[in-house]
Every structure is written in structure tokens, then in C-alpha cells.
Image (tube, rainbow, N blue to C red):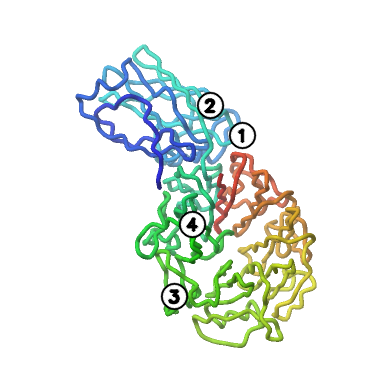
């Protein structure tokens, strides 16, 4: 992953240190995992002298290790609840004593919200600010520090170690991580921190230390494209969509995506398909040369690979796609269940690929066809092609909305009328519909859990976000749970982008704040357990650092925020 290893802030190691310690890393990372190797006994003199020693300067990540928390103990100002494996993103601190023998060392930390603990397994414990550790016969011990999330404690702490009538101190400074995960079915690895954690109540930093250009989400996996074009992913990879060459169902730490020749993906420009957590194990990536690649589910040759089979299969490494299309894609929209994709080409035309018997769910404006691996252009009722489209998005296998390059909005589908925009003629053909106010610049769709509860979002040049459609979970973010057939204003100003899970919406504004609305499933709102079941008026997530750059959400409700 190209991590810059943190410096072990001491002059040597003692024999017998073979455990993995996590200490301060680069300006872009959670604390790096550094292998502390055994040192010959003759090198023991390299250990700093004194009866007790801890590295005097330490660096950790805001929120690191707090994934142990299911609750917040307001009286103590510390995390509490069921203990979980959290060493991967905690700051681990070695302590040595001289003479080298088993010795009790008293450890205390001062700093609001910082907690000490000794173990990383699921043994029940409550984090505290004072512990006693026993070094090994070689005089070496290890303890871990959980650093509070943003806004829930201090940014600097002092650690004191006392043994053999002597005291050593260390200053622990903190910085922000590059990417955080909150909530969701993160026991599958969506936390990207090496631990099998579920329903994270507070933001947990990923185990990466390189700048990230974008984060994306699929059914139950997360994926990042780094600033250099590398692809890193994790999560429930049963559909092989991470392109690692395997289908390990719980990929707990970031792994590299591979091209079909086995080489790492190093020239990714953007991930097109899964920005808003589709219930579909598939990632589609455009490289810097403009070529398109995909890994994951391939059924009825929805990926338009010339000569490929139409059987249901998975592609476990990123493979070139789109060769059967008549032009270069600009966007592709995924479906929840059916074997069909909707492609927007750079020339403004729209094409459907896959199982032709399913196409009528979206539109009747096509000549009737049967068969698999079909490539068919979207047409109006009179048989003329739909053209001038900037982006076409579908919501739940039944509805399709398109934003034209001239600002018009088109719609077709066969969903229940209560969830379709007002004024739409429900005959299954493509129609122009009333657009929201302003000059329109971007469009998104929400793939919901509830059948037909589809919704769409359009942003205008004034950065206002407008929504229409189903609202069972409050995902229209307008203060209600009432479906709307008319465009309704989302209650966040100066919107940059959105991302949706199956029951919630994330909204990133241009100041870098992230807002949440919808059902707070598996703690995905990021501010602890015991919160409201539904949030209809967006609330700002206050436990993440400021200045977010981009967001994503898995369909299984893991919130991802990148910096």
C-alpha cells in the first residue's frame, strides 16, 4: 500500500520483542503497523538507559482505537461497552525496564477522552486512564491508547510510566486520518482497519497512509482510488468485486485491486458505477487512458465484453469492458437485481445491456427483443433515439431519470405512481418532466430497501439539492417521511455531493461538513449508539474531522468519509 513506516522512537530493541506494534506514521495515515523484530542479546545495550523507558514523542490518529466503544460514558468521558479488537488503529506503546526482568509498571494518561487498555481481543474490559502492566522476563511490555473522535476529547495527551522508583513520560500528539468508516455491517471488513468490527458507533480510521482521490461503495465493500491511481479495497468480497483475484468474504485490511494480467491497478482515474452504494457486487473503473474495467458480477454480458459468455459468473480481476458499445461511456448505472445496465455515452445517447426481457421495466420505447448479451439504444415512443443526455441513473430496477446537457429532465419506468414525479404519464415511455429550479448540474438516484420507494436528487448551479420520490426512511431529507411527487428542497445548503445507503443519505457540503438523514441503521449516523431511529431533518456528523473531501456509503449502511 506504499505506507511510510513510522519511526520507532527509541534507539534499540531488546531480545524477545516479536509482537506487532503500532506507532506514529506519516501525515496521511493511521498509525502504521510496524513489525518489531527480535534483537540479539548482545544488542541489549542499545536500549535507552534508566529504570523505566517509553518513547518520549508519539503520534496517533484522531478516533484511532475508539472502535472499542459501543457507548460513551459521560461520567468518565471515556468509551465504554463491549470490547472489540481495536489495536489496528490504536497507538501501541512499548515500555522497557532495567534491569530486564518481569516488572509491574504503572501507566497513566492525562487527556480528555484518551483511554488505556492492554488487550486487543474480545475479552470484556472497560477502557480506563490508569492501568498496571507486567513486562515480560526480557523487561519489555506493550499497552495501547485509544484516541477520542473529533470533538469528544483533547488532541494531545501525556503518558506517565512508573516502575523501579523511576518515572518516564511521553507526549502523544494526534492528527487526522485519511479515511474513516462509521456504522454498517463493518464486521465484514468495511472498517478497513484490519479488525472484524461491526456496527461502529464512532468513526474508525482506515489503515492507509497515502492521499486518496476518491472513495466508493458497493453492496458490502468499500474501495479507494489513491492520488497515484492505485486501487485499494476491503469488505465482504464474496462477489469478487474488489478485483483481488479471490473471493475472500471478509477482507479486513486494504488490499490491492489487480488487472486481469495479475498486475496491480496503478492508473485508475475514477470509479463510475458504485458511488452510491448499489445492491450489486460490481465496480467499474475508468483508467487515465480512458479505458474501462470491471470486477464482480457479470450476468447476461451486462458488461458488454465482445464474445464473452452470457452465463452468470464473477470476474475476480479487473477486466476491460464496454467493447460492444458503439461509443465511449461517460457513466454506467447499476441495477439492484436484474441483469441489465444503463450506459450514458459521451455522445449523449443511452444504451441498455444484458437481458433484453428486463428492459421494458425501464422503458417501452424499444423494439421488443429477447435474449442475453443484448445491446440496445434507448428510444422515444415514436422510435427516435434519446440524445443529448449528460447522465442517466436508475433507482430500483423500475425507474430511470436522465439529466440532459441542456438542463431538461427525462423520466421513464414502471414504478408505482405514488413514487413517480408529478405530471409523468405512466405509460412506460420516455417523457420530459418538470425540472427543479435553477441551472441543473448533477443527478443521483437512491436504491432503497423497500420496493418502489425510489427517489432521485438533482443539484443546481447554486448548490441547492432537490429531491423527489419515496421517503419511507426520511431520505428526501426534507423533515418528513412523506413521499413527494413534486421536487422538494433538501435541507442542507451549499451541497457538493451526496451518497446513499439503502436506508439513509449522506450529504457533503462545500465547507467539508457531512450531514446525515434517514434510518440510523447499525449506528451509521456516527455519533454513538442510542441515537434516533430516524433522522428526517439532516444533522451534521460532529465526530469526524472537518474538511471532508468526498463521501460514500455501502448499500449495507457503512458511512465512509475521506479527506
- Local SS, label 4: strand
- Local SS, label 2: strand
- Mark 3 or mark 4, earlier in chain: 4
Compare residues 130 and 357 and report the one nearer the observer: 357
Q: Which residue is mark 4?
A: 221
- 6 vs 288, left or right, is left
Compare residues 511 and 476 and report the one nearer the observer: 511
Q: Residue at x 29, y 27 (%)?
A: 13
On-image quarter of the C terminus: top right
Q: Is residue 364 shown above or below 144? A: below
Q: Which mark is residue 151?
A: 1
Q: Which mark is residue 156?
A: 2
- Local SS, label 3: loop
Q: Specify the farthest residue to the top.
A: 165
Q: Residue 268: x percent and y percent? A: 48, 58
- Mark 2 or mark 1, earlier in chain: 1
- Mark 2 or mark 3, earlier in chain: 2
Graded by Cα atoms within 10 Å as few (under 14), some (14 to 19) or many (20 or more), the crowding at tag 1 reads few
User: Comparing marks 2 and 1, which lies closer to the viewer?
Assistant: 2
Cα–Cα span, label 3 and label 4: 20 Å
- Mark 1 or mark 3, earlier in chain: 1
- Mark 1 or mark 4, earlier in chain: 1
Graded by Cα atoms within 10 Å as few (under 14), some (14 to 19) or many (20 or more), the crowding at tag 4 reads many
Q: Residue at x 43, y 19 (%)?
A: 169
- Local SS, label 1: loop
Q: Residue 263: x percent and y percent? A: 36, 59
Q: Specify the farthest residue to the front.
A: 289
Graded by Cα atoms within 10 Å as few (under 14), some (14 to 19) or many (20 or more), the crowding at tag 2 reads some
Q: Which residue is mark 3?
A: 312
Amino acid at each position: 500500500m506504499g505506507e511510510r513506516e513510522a519511526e520507532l522512537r527509541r534507539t534499540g530493541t531488546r531480545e524477545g520483542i516479536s509482537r506487532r506494534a503500532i506507532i506514529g506514521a506519516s501525515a496521511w495515515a493511521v498509525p502504521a503497523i510496524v513489525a518489531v523484530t527480535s534483537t540479539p542479546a548482545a544488542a541489549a545495550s542499545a536500549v535507552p538507559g534508566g529504570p523505566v523507558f517509553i518513547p518520549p514523542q508519539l503520534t496517533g490518529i484522531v478516533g484511532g482505537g475508539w472502535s472499542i466503544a459501543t457507548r460513551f460514558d459521560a461520567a468518565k468521558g471515556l468509551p465504554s461497552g463491549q470490547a472489540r479488537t481495536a489495536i489496528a488503529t490504536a497507538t501501541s506503546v512499548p515500555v522497557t525496564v532495567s534491569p530486564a526482568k518481569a516488572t509491574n509498571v504503572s501507566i497513566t494518561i492525562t487527556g480528555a477522552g484518551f483511554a488505556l487498555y492492554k488487550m486487543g481481543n474480545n475479552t470484556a474490559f472497560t477502557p480506563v486512564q490508569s492501568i498496571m502492566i507486567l513486562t515480560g522476563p526480557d523487561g519489555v511490555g506493550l499497552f495501547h491508547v485509544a484516541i477520542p473522535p473529533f470533538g469528544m476529547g483533547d488532541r494531545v495527551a501525556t503518558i506517565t510510566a512508573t516502575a523501579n522508583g523511576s518515572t518516564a513520560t511521553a507526549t502523544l500528539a494526534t492528527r487526522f486520518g485519511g479515511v474513516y468508516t462509521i456504522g454498517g455491517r463493518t464486521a465484514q471488513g468495511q472498517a478497513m482497519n484490519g479488525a472484524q468490527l461491526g456496527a461502529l458507533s464512532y468513526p474508525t480510521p482506515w489503515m492507509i497512509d497515502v492521499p486518496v482521490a476518491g472513495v466508493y461503495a458497493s453492496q458490502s465493500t468499500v474501495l479507494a482510488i489513491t492520488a497515484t491511481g492505485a486501487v485499494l479495497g476491503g469488505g465482504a468480497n464474496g462477489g469478487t468485486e474488489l478485483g483481488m483475484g479471490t473471493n475472500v468474504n471478509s477482507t479486513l485490511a486494504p488490499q490491492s485491486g489487480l488487472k486481469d494480467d495479475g498486475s496491480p491497478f496503478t492508473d485508475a482515474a475514477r470509479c463510475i458505477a458504485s458511488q452510491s452504494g448499489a445492491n450489486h457486487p460490481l465496480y467499474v473503473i475508468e483508467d487515465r487512458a480512458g479505458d474501462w474495467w470491471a470486477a464482480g458480477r457479470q450476468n447476461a454480458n451486462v458488461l458488454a465484453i465482445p464474445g464473452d459468455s452470457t452465463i452468470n459468473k464473477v470476474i475476480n480481476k479487473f477486466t476491460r469492458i464496454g467493447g460492444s458499445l458503439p461509443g465511449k461511456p461517460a457513466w454506467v448505472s447499476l441495477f439492484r437485481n436484474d441483469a441489465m445496465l444503463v450506459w450514458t455515452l459521451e455522445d449523449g445517447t443511452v444504451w441498455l445491456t444484458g437481458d433484453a426481457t428486463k428492459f421494458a421495466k425501464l422503458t417501452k420505447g424499444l423494439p421488443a427483443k429477447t435474449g442475453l448479451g443484448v445491446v440496445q439504444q434507448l428510444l422515444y415512443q415514436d422510435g427516435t433515439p434519446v440524445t443529448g443526455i449528460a447522465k442517466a441513473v436508475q433507482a430500483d430496477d423500475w425507474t430511470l431519470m436522465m439529466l440532459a446537457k441542456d438542463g431538461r429532465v427525462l423520466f421513464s419506468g414502471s414504478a408505482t405512481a405514488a413514487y413517480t414525479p408529478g405530471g409523468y404519464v405512466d405509460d412506460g415511455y420516455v417523457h420530459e418532466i418538470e425540472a427543479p429550479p435553477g441551472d441543473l448540474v448533477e443527478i443521483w438516484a437512491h436504491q432503497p430497501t423497500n420496493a418502489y420507494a425510489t427517489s432521485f436528487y438533482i443539484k443546481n448551479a447554486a448548490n441547492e439539492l432537490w429531491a423527489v420520490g419515496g421517503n419511507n426512511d426520511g431520505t428526501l431529507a426534507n423533515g418528513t417521511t412523506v413521499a413527494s411527487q413534486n421536487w422538494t428542497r433538501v435541507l442542507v445548503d451549499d451541497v457538493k455531493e451526496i451518497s446513499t445507503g439503502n436506508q439513509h443519505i449522506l450529504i457533503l457540503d462545500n465547507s467539508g461538513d457531512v450531514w446525515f438523514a434517514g434510518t440510523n441503521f447499525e449506528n451509521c449516523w456516527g455519533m454513538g449508539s442510542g441515537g434516533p431511529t430516524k433522522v428526517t431533518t439532516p444533522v451534521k456528523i460532529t465526530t469526524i474531522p472537518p474538511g471532508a473531501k468526498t463521501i460514500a456509503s455501502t448499500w449495507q449502511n457503512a458511512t465512509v468519509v475521506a479527506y
